[in-house]
Image: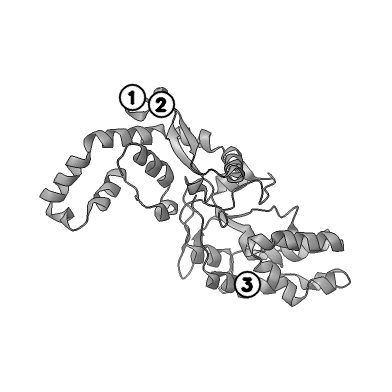
């Protein structure tokens, strides 16, 4: 839910690993043969988000054969090319596991609820996140292997909630471009200190940004991923924060720092992170599930 800044070295490794998977053998005549040169394929694979519209306009203008493009970039029935080959398991070649391990994103960028870590060892590939095509590969097959179009996400968000919904850069939050955390904030519909049980309140979002376009995109993402409905299944965690507020006020935290040798050198921020069972820092939101919810509600309670 915070914008992810990508190390260009990861993009370069991705390009070097997958460029050979693009099925250039399908481009035997024009306009496909001339357009999909090695240089253009490199441009497409490494294409920055802001340049997606340029690629889209070029291909729409040329009238490229969509069936050929799908075979080359999405893949054929034998999984010999494109995204299908990229997502098959293989220990000796660059695959989806290599990308997810390099990205090291532990929590879904869309919902911040489900783990998306990668587990591999020398002999086996166990777990990795899904890769959602932000711009769907049915409508934009030539972007099926574009780095910035592949969003690590949980299966619930990718396969169940987004599924075939059509996202655009102008309609939804892109985790590599937009910072949801600076646009929206979790809140409760009734002051939490006045609530005794889950029936007393609902979890909702309020605006942080004044930018109407960004707020609209965030609202669309909230709707598409059913975030209000999903997060209202976690009222118990919010009520626990209220209990922690009542147990661990500023004075009690200062006493812990004063009287407990173990924590003297850790500092107040560390104690607060223990109380919250989550980090107090925005940059750590994508490291644990529900971190944004816990941080936002903790701020409302003045826990942090």
Closer to viewer: mark 3 or mark 2? 2
The residue lying toward the viewer, choosing from 285 and 250, is: 250
Mark 3, Cα crowd under 10 Å, few <14 / some 14-19 / many 20+, is many
Label 1: how many Cα within 10 Å (few below 14, some 14–19, many 20+) = few
User: SS at mark 2?
Assistant: loop
Residue that label 2 marks: 190
Asked if marks 2 and 1 touch (Cβ < 8 Å), the reply is: yes
With 51 as the anchor, is 263 left or right in this view? left
Helix, strand or loop for disc 3: helix
Residue at 48%, 42% in the rendered image:
208
Q: Is residue 41 left or right of residue 199?
A: right
Residue drawn at 22 percent across, 38 percent down: 249
Circle on res. 101: none
At 86% from the left and 73% from the top, the residue drawn is 28
CA distance separating discs 2 and 1: 7 Å
Q: Looking at this view, is 17 or 170 the one in front? A: 170
Residue 194 image label: 1
Q: Quadrant of residue 303?
A: top left
Q: Which residue is mark 3?
A: 15
């Amino acid at each position: 839910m915070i914008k992810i800044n990508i190390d260009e070295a990861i993009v370069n490794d991705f390009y070097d690993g997958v460029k050979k998977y693009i099925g250039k053998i399908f481009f035997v005549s024009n306009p496909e043969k001339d357009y999909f040169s090695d240089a253009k394929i490199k441009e497409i694979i490494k294409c920055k988000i802001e340049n997606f519209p340029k690629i889209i306009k070029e291909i729409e203008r040329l009238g490229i054969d969509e069936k050929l493009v799908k075979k080359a970039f999405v893949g054929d029935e034998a999984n010999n090319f494109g995204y299908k080959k990229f997502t098959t398991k293989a220990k000796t070649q660059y695959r989806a596991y290599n990308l997810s391990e390099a990205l090291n994103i532990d929590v879904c960028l869309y919902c911040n609820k489900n783990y998306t870590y990668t587990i591999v060892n020398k002999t086996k590939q166990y777990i990795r996140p899904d890769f959602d095509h932000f711009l769907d590969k049915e409508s934009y097959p030539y972007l099926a292997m574009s780095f910035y179009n592949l969003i690590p996400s949980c299966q619930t968000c990718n396969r169940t909630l987004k599924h075939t919904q059509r996202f655009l850069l102008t309609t939804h939050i892109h985790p590599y471009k937009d910072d949801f955390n600076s646009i929206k904030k979790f809140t409760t519909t009734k002051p939490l200190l006045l609530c005794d049980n889950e029936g007393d309140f609902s979890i909702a979002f309020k605006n942080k940004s004044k930018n109407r376009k960004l707020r609209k995109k965030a609202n669309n993402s909230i709707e598409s991923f059913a975030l209000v409905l999903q997060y209202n299944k976690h009222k118990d965690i919010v009520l626990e924060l209220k209990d922690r507020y009542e147990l661990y006020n500023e004075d009690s935290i200062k006493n812990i720092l004063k009287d407990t040798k173990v924590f003297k050198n850790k500092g107040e921020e560390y104690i607060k992170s223990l109380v919250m069972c989550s980090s107090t820092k925005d940059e750590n939101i994508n490291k644990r599930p529900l971190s944004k919810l816990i941080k936002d509600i903790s701020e409302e309670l003045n826990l942090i």
